[in-house]
Image (cartoon, coloured by chain):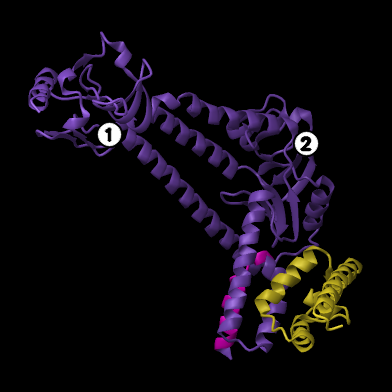
Chain colours: A yellow, B purple
Amino acid sequence: MLILASLAAGPKHGYAIMSDIEAFSGVAVGPGTLYTAITRLVEKKLIVPKETPGRQRPYEITRSGASLLTTQLQEMQHVATAGLERLRLI
Amino acid sequence: MKLRESVIGLLLRAYPAAWRREFGAELEEVLLHSQLGAPAIVNVIAGAFGERVLNLIRRITIGGEMADQTFGAHHDRMTQIISGSAVVLLVAIPLMAIRSGTVAIVLALFSAAAIALAYGYSPRGFEISDGAFRVKRLMGDVVFPLTSLRFVRDANPADFRGSVRLWASGGLFGYYGLFWSKALGKSKWYVTDRSKAIVLTNGSQTVLVSPEDHDGFVAAIERADAGISAPSAESADTGRRFINIAGFAIRIVGFAIGGLGLAIGAAALLYAPGRPPVDLTGDALVIHSRFCGMTVPASSVDAAHVRVVDLQTESGWRPTMKTYGFDNPHYRAGNFRTANGQAIKLFTTGSERLVLLPPSSQDGLPVLLDVDDPDQFAARIRQEWSIQ
């Protein structure tokens, strides 16, 4: 989901995704973990590589990837709201 | 810098070749620009291990891994019926012989080996990658260079009519191996669905395959034939070498397991230690046996009724089924059932005359023991233990 969230802002290659995730979430994703996740996301057609001449292909979130990200973020938001309400923080 | 590149190269080689072709260059770039400490190295190795495990699972389940083009191997109805029936039969035969102990073990080993080998060598899928066409199998892939492979035509019923198996499976998990038929002559088949079979030629050889996606496969072969997907000689060699090594290793492990199984089966069948040595004291009888050796306390035996049983005249005492222990034509030791349904402890080399030690209570089990001189031994027990 972190990768999908990173790509929601626009296409990025592997290293840029790693840096972006660390910047917006504080989570340091290892290169092995990153490419395992990228492989699965490509297989599920949630992201697609864009063909470029360089060695680093940028990835782009697909429509189904964006849809899945939206659903998951809404669910998280629902849970977060419920938790904060119970803590009387909102 | 060179050391760093070498380490990265090694790390990348931990991934499956097909994965490297797709993502290798990118990961290399990421690693070149990242801090390459121990956590990153461990992380990459873990990722590579995960990909290899996933590839192995895919090979086992669908016969495919990430490749330029992978085609499944669907089994037609006849193959499913033959495979299902053969597996049921191979499982049922040892079960039917379960009463005969070692024979059942040998039959079970044979059945397991037959199923494993037939499954291991059956086509699990087809792959076009690295300038080669591979028939994916658990026990080593069959590799044909694409440069020499040509699509001839779709197979037709005449190709299969009157076919003779020269060294092949005729339906158990597919039709694969060396066949002869009037229409094709001597040919190699890797077919699981005859309705989708395709005739290829490998220069001197005729090859039949049956990829699930018939049209996609033919298009891929024809593209390769036209030189559209030019192979990288180096990567083709590397991939082939890896597949050959993996296939060889799998074969070695398979043969080792099979050999070990046969050795254990043969040893179990031939084991003949002779009559078990015994130590008789005033308190107990110690029966020394590698399998189920035991100490029989004098108090647990109805000593006055210790006697010799002749199995020819008292066939009800004949052991018919092992419930626990060891049983082969030369030696039986452990818990058995007799012809009249009695549970007993038995130690015999197959003699007809055995010493019977009846239990002193209803909870105990009778012991049937093979000794050199049964009459003398029974008399000795009666004498030594009855006094007490």
Give residue B51's position: percent from left, percent from top: 65, 65
Per the image, the residue denoted by label 2 is B155
> Which of the 4 image quadrants contains residue B70?
bottom right
Give residue B104's position: percent from left, percent from top: 43, 29
**Dots 1, 2 in contact, CB < 8 A:** no
B239 drawn magenta: no
**Rendered position, A15 above or below A48:** below
Depth check: give the residue in front, B154 or B251: B251
Depth check: give the residue in front, A81 or B154: A81
In this picture, which residue range is highlighted in magenta? B3-18
Amino acid residing under circle 1: Tyr
Give residue A10's position: percent from left, percent from top: 88, 81
Disc 1 and disc 2 on one polypeptide chain: yes
Asked whether the viewer can see residue A17, the reply is: yes
> Which of the 4 image quadrants contains residue A44?
bottom right
In the rendered structure, find residue B169 and report the number of the disc placed on it.
Answer: none
In the rendered structure, find residue B271 and report the number of the disc placed on it.
Answer: 1
